[in-house]
Amino acid sequence: MKTAGIDGCKAGWILITFDDTPAYKILRTNEELKHELTEADLTFIDMPIGLEDENYTRKCDQLLRNKLGADYASSVFSPPIRPALQAPSYVEASMQSYEYTEKKLTIQAWNITPKIRVLDQFLSEDRELSKKVLESHPELLFMNLNGGMIYQKKNTKKGLRHRLDLVKEHEPIAADFFREIKEEYRRNEVEEDDIVDAMVLALAAKWSPEKGIKTLPEEPEFDSAGLRKAIHFV
């Protein structure tokens, strides 16, 4: 079974796999992303998939915030509602969000909207692809790896190192990958936290056939495009 973890980065996307032949790739184009999603049997990706039409916050995001706790809830962005997904500018997207929900779109959510839009198109057009590309969240995966607790925020050196150590316990090659990616790519292409996030997504995807996949909520709903609104984890 071919599995992968994918996280967004400034260069595009970073993919890591811990399968029999561990590897990492930077995907700079939409075509490269679609190719890798198609080739893999299962991908955990840190990007919103199912979207609301009129509600500002998805149930899965609220459940995730509650699970992570107040100190880490800010790592969960409410994605744009579907009517605002194709808006050409932040101002228009925010206005559409306010029209339906009486809340404006955050700039953090707008910054990842182009990636949400691309992924949404791929999965809406290919139902088989939507079954094997699953939304996840690195902080939830790290929490589970650490026995139900999060050790400092990942924007601190200690927090980042702790997350890397958690993955290294199960995949020692993670240390080499972390060093090599930092040497090969500039910080304005791939941030350190992008690397560890992709790693824990890859680890969870690899474990999922054996451990099973759980979701927030336990019984997910589907959006108007037929895409699941859920956070997947092991």
Image (cartoon, helix red, strand yellow):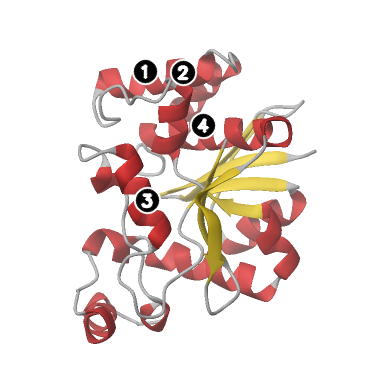
| Residue type at the position of mark 1 | His
Q: Which mark is residue 200?
A: 4
Q: Secondary structure at mark 1?
A: helix
Q: Secondary structure at mark 2?
A: helix
Q: Quadrant of the N terminus?
A: top right
- At 57% across and 78% down in the image, what residue appears? 225
Find residue 162 and name its label.
1
Name which residue type carries label 3.
Leu
Q: Is residue 198 above or below residue 79?
A: above
Q: Which residue is mark 3?
A: 63
- How many marks do you count on the picture? 4
The residues tagged by marks 2 and 1 sit, at their Cα atoms, a distance apart of 6 Å
Work out whether 27 lies above or below 164: below
Q: Amino acid at mark 2?
A: Leu
User: Residue shown at 23%/77% (left/top)?
Assistant: 94
Figure quadrant of residue 44: top right
Measuring from the top left, give residue 220's x and y in whole percent. Answer: 54, 60
Q: Give whichever of 73, 21 is nearer the camera.
A: 73
Please say if the residues under marks 4 and 2 sit with CB atoms less than 8 Å apart: yes
Q: Is residue 194 visible?
A: no
Which residue matches tag 2? 166
Mark 3 vs 4, N-terminal side: 3
Q: Residues within 10 Å of mark 3 (few under 14, many from 20)?
A: some
Q: Quadrant of the C terminus?
A: top right
Q: Is residue 178 left or right of residue 205?
A: left
